[in-house]
Image: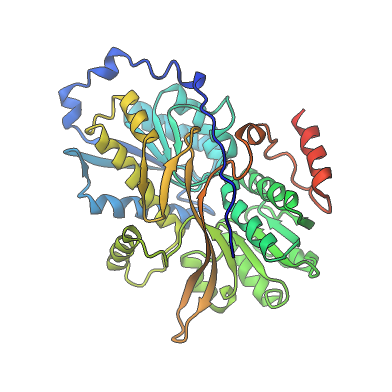
């Protein structure tokens, strides 16, 4: 199957960065004492709550890469200071202030939940703290909204849309043109569904049903009873521990045998969940930016290190994301000789990165968001009873703009259209977007 696409086009928003690129005297003259001191990286993650497992995986990915390089860059030790955001915006901003004003961190990393991303972004930009999103925060506005975009904010993981564009392409190319949706009801979930719906409907697909369970749902029975089984597939984005419960109950209700299950971002069948789901996960198809069976030297090295440290633990994409994120941060730091205070040079180092991580090819677009490879995978059971992810397709160089012009994506009303996609066509979608954008 040929999955070639026309490449996305990028434009450079120069005016946004004019004031940034004029360095102050303080930036140019980093004290020698600072050069010897540790580089402090503050890590904001929702360690408690539905994202606890994902947060641990991101942390372990960070730590694993730092172990690889001996915990130092350009002769300076890397010190991680981790704070629990509880997946709450108000808590996240409090913890961000603590990291910046008390701990005096040089860089902020992590961030998983969109709400916490939106909460801390203005503050961190105001304080001119380099912020590198190495967690799953897909907040679309972070790298698109002029009120939020900043030369100090970069994302190494994905935007919300990048999680679903490959899934929309896969479904359409495999003649699955009528789907039902079950997405978690929160800011990130609404942005993910907006991105999926646009790509899928514009490609000729029809969404026949939308269901939005609240975060923290334990009994999905009432939702299972509503799912329309005449769809070609069920597309889901059920985050955190909710996803594990949903996948278990989907199998228990006998729906998996009747309606193919598509797991956007591998949030249901990823990593530790696969151990618990076992046969309930077999056949589930996911779209994500990491493939365990990628044979690149970088991934083989990562797998060896992970398996040596966590012998019987199933690997998740979050671990790979944290590992790749720290690879990216430290590569940029090495390029500036560890002089984290020279923000002009550090900005240039990030912008110029073109490397291969354990996830695949990596670079930043002109809006400081990752451009990377994505994979469509299926859970399979081997003859000896092991559960594995098999890559079906690789989609190279996926960007936050997919096949559209940046200007057409920047004005899209993310988070405002969920619940309005049922049984509409491309023309109706265009009218809906135009109305919501005014």
Q: Residue at x 37, y 15 (%)?
A: 22
The percent coordinates of residue 393 (x first, y second) are 54, 64
Q: Report which quarter residue 45 is drawn in.
A: top left
Residue that sits furthest to the bottom in the current view: 383
Q: Residue at x 79, y 49 (%)?
A: 421
Q: Residue at x 60, y 70 (%)?
A: 284
- The front one of 76 and 240 is 76
Residue that sits furthest to the top in the current view: 25
| Color scheme of the displayed model | rainbow
Residue 185 position (above or below residue 11): below
Residue 419 position (above or below residue 37): below
- The front one of 408 and 326 is 408
The percent coordinates of residue 190 (x first, y second) are 67, 46
The answer to whether any part of residue 267 appears in the image is no
- Where's the N terminus, which quadrant? bottom right
- Where's the C terminus, which quadrant? top right
- The front one of 27 and 168 is 168
Residue 434 relative to residue 289: left or right: right
The percent coordinates of residue 425 (x first, y second) are 82, 50
The answer to whether any part of residue 362 appears in the image is yes
Residue 412 relative to residue 385: left or right: right
The percent coordinates of residue 156 (x first, y second) are 44, 44
Label total for image: 0
Q: Residue at x 75, y 67 (%)?
A: 232
Residue 104 relative to residue 212: left or right: left
Residue 217 position (above or below residue 382): above
Residue 260 position (above or below residue 217): below
């Amino acid at each position: 199957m040929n999955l070639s696409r026309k490449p996305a086009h990028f434009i450079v928003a120069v005016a946004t960065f004019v004031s940034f690129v004029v360095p102050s005297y303080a930036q140019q003259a980093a004290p020698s004492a600072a050069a010897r001191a540790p580089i402090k990286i503050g890590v904001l993650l929702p360690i408690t709550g539905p994202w606890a497992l994902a947060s641990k995986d991101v942390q372990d990915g960070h730590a694993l890469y730092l172990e690889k390089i001996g915990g130092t860059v350009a002769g300076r030790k890397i010190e991680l200071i981790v704070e629990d955001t509880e997946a709450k915006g108000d808590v996240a901003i409090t913890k961000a202030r603590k990291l910046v004003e008390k701990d005096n961190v040089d860089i902020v990393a992590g961030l998983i939940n969109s709400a916490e991303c939106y909460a801390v972004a203005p503050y961190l930009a105001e304080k001119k703290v380099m912020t590198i999103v190495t967690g799953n925060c897909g907040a679309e506005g972070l790298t698109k909204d002029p009120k939020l975009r900043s030369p100090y904010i970069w994302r190494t993981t994905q935007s919300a849309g990048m999680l679903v564009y490959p899934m929309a392409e896969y479904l359409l190319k495999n003649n699955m043109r009528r789907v039902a949706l079950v997405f978690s009801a929160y800011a990130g979930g609404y942005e993910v569904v907006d991105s999926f719906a646009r790509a899928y409907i514009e490609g000729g697909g029809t969404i026949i049903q939308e269901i939005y369970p609240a975060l923290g749902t334990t009994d999905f029975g009432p939702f299972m009873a509503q799912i329309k089984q005449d769809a070609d597939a069920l597309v889901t984005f059920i985050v955190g521990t909710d996803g594990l419960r949903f996948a278990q109950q989907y199998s228990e209700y006998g729906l998996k045998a009747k309606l193919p299950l598509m797991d956007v971002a591998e949030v249901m069948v990823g990593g530790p969940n696969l151990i618990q789901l076992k046969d309930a996960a077999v056949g589930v198809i996911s779209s994500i930016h990491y493939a365990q069976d990628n044979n690149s030297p970088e991934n083989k090295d990562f797998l060896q290190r992970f398996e040596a440290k966590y012998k019987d633990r199933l690997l998740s994409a979050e671990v790979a994301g944290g590992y790749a994120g720290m690879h990216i941060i430290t590569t940029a730091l090495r390029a500036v000789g560890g002089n984290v205070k020279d923000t002009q040079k550090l900005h240039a180092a990030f912008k110029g990165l073109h490397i291969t991580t354990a996830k695949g090819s990596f670079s930043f677009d002109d809006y400081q968001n990752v451009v990377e490879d994505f994979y469509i995978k299926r859970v399979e059971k081997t003859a000896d009873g092991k559960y594995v992810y098999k890559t079906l397709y690789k989609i190279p160089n996926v960007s936050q703009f997919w096949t559209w012009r940046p200007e057409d994506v920047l004005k899209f009303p993310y988070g405002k259209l969920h619940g309005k996609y049922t049984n509409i066509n491309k023309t109706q979608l265009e009218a809906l977007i135009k109305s919501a954008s005014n």
